[in-house]
Image (cartoon, grey):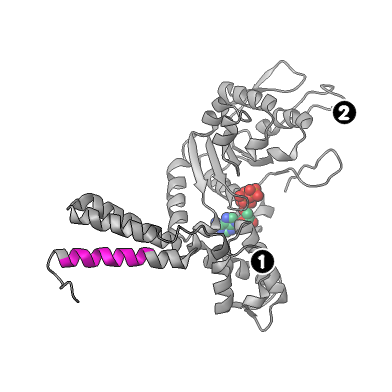
Amino acid sequence: MNARYREDGDDAPLITLPNSQALATSIRATAQVFEDPRSVALLGRIRQVAPSEANVLIIGETGTGKELIARHVHALSHRAHGPFVAVNCGAFSESLVESELFGHEKGAFTGAFSAKAGWFEAASGGTLFLDEIGDLPMSIQVKLLRVLQEREVVRLGSRKAVPIDVRVIAATNVRLEEAVAAGHFREDLFYRLRVVNLELVALRDRPGDILPLARYFVDEYRRRLGYGKVGIAADAEHKLLQHAWPGNIRELENAVHHALLVCRNQVLRGDDLHLSSLQLRRATAPSAPPDAATQLEQALLALFEEDREALFEQIEEMVMRTAYHHCHRNQVQAAKLLGISRNILRARLIKNGEIDALR
Ligand SMILES: Nc1ncnc2c1ncn2[C@@H]1O[C@H](COP(=O)(O)OP(=O)(O)OP(=O)(O)O)[C@@H](O)[C@H]1O
């Protein structure tokens, strides 16, 4: 794998250039667990938009898999045989970022001992993934917009424009609309990047992925550690499902890795999962005012009495969906909402004479 390092001495890599054999062995490159209905829907959307040349903006909390999704878009695009270049815009100092992105000529600034292509040129024929795009300084945003419009870059210290053939996928964990409203992000650039918008929901909001991901990571890490098969006990599964996962998939991966190191008898138990310093889902779930459910129920029943059947059905479906959403986060709310649905159904059956009111 080709990796570059910071010039200030910190040896954290700033870039990964995949499509190399080395990456094929990493979890990052191969993992594709998408079981929750919301993840399945996202995959469907990716299949639709990947073959186009449109720029993509991926939004999601940290660790939700933005880079993995960007790689997936690239892999399903016509550029799959070209490079995928991942750059973390937040990793550069303002003075470095311009030459890193657009390149520079020899002598363009103190320390520029030789000419160097920037990431745009490195990604030619492929995809450039700009992570943490919200961290890009305003002065560079203007230049990036120009590059995207003109489809050419001018290296620092040069006058010659170099044509580029790059698809840009940008990612952010902040709401860029808010950054635009606050004047920190250019609106024109925002629209230029957001031709396709992919939103990655937090892991807590796609609970159907939690256990499949946990099993995937158990299997992956136990093989790396040279262990035989390792199971997940019911109490561990319960704990995994109850956790809020503020660090999303990355946090889950690390928790499973650690649990494997301390587990015994080839079973991962609840006590092996060290999640205590993080909030539990139930504690973070916002709860509705105590009588909100009752008020809702009364309003729905009134609508029903007025015979506004179509509207009523729509709302009923909404209640069911909300109940499903709540059932992993706040069981009291879920139970109330399911109770409302039951009462509505009962009222309907009574009204249609299908059951007796006294039953
Ligand atoms: N669907 C998935 N299946 C399996 N593993 C996944 C999935 N999505 C993400 N991961 C893993 O979770 C980890 C975090 O993913 P990734 O780096 O893509 O997240 P991110 O949103 O880009 O994070 P950040 O915002 O911090 O840059 C990686 O190890 C990745 O391989």
- Between discs 2 and 1, the one toward the N terminus: 2
Question: Residue 238: image x %, image y %?
Answer: 54, 73
Can residue 31 be seen in this snapshot?
Answer: no
Whole-angstrom CA distance, mark 2 to mark 1, is 43 Å
Residue placed most toward the observer, 70 or 192: 192
Name the residue rendered at 62%, 62% in the picture: 279
Question: Residue 151: image x %, image y %?
Answer: 58, 24
Q: Examine the rendered structure and indicate whether residue 207 appears above or below residue 307.
A: below
> In which quarter of the view is residue 171 placed?
top right
> In which quarter of the view is residue 235 placed?
bottom right
Name the residue rendered at 63%, 37% in the picture: 133
Span of residues in magenta: 337-350
Dot 2 amino acid type: Gly
For label 1, being within 8 Å of ligand 1 is answered no
Specify the farthest residue to the bottom.
Answer: 265
Q: Which residue is mark 1?
A: 255
Residue placed most toward the observer, 6 or 284: 284
The C terminus - image quarter: bottom left
Q: Which residue is mark 2?
A: 111
Dot 1 amino acid type: Ala
Secondary-structure class at tag 1 = helix
Magenta stretch secondary structure, dominant: helix
Viewed as shown, does residue 225 lie left or right of 200? right
Residue placed most toward the observer, 78 or 327: 327
Q: Examine the rendered structure and indicate whether residue 263 appears above or below residue 100.
A: below
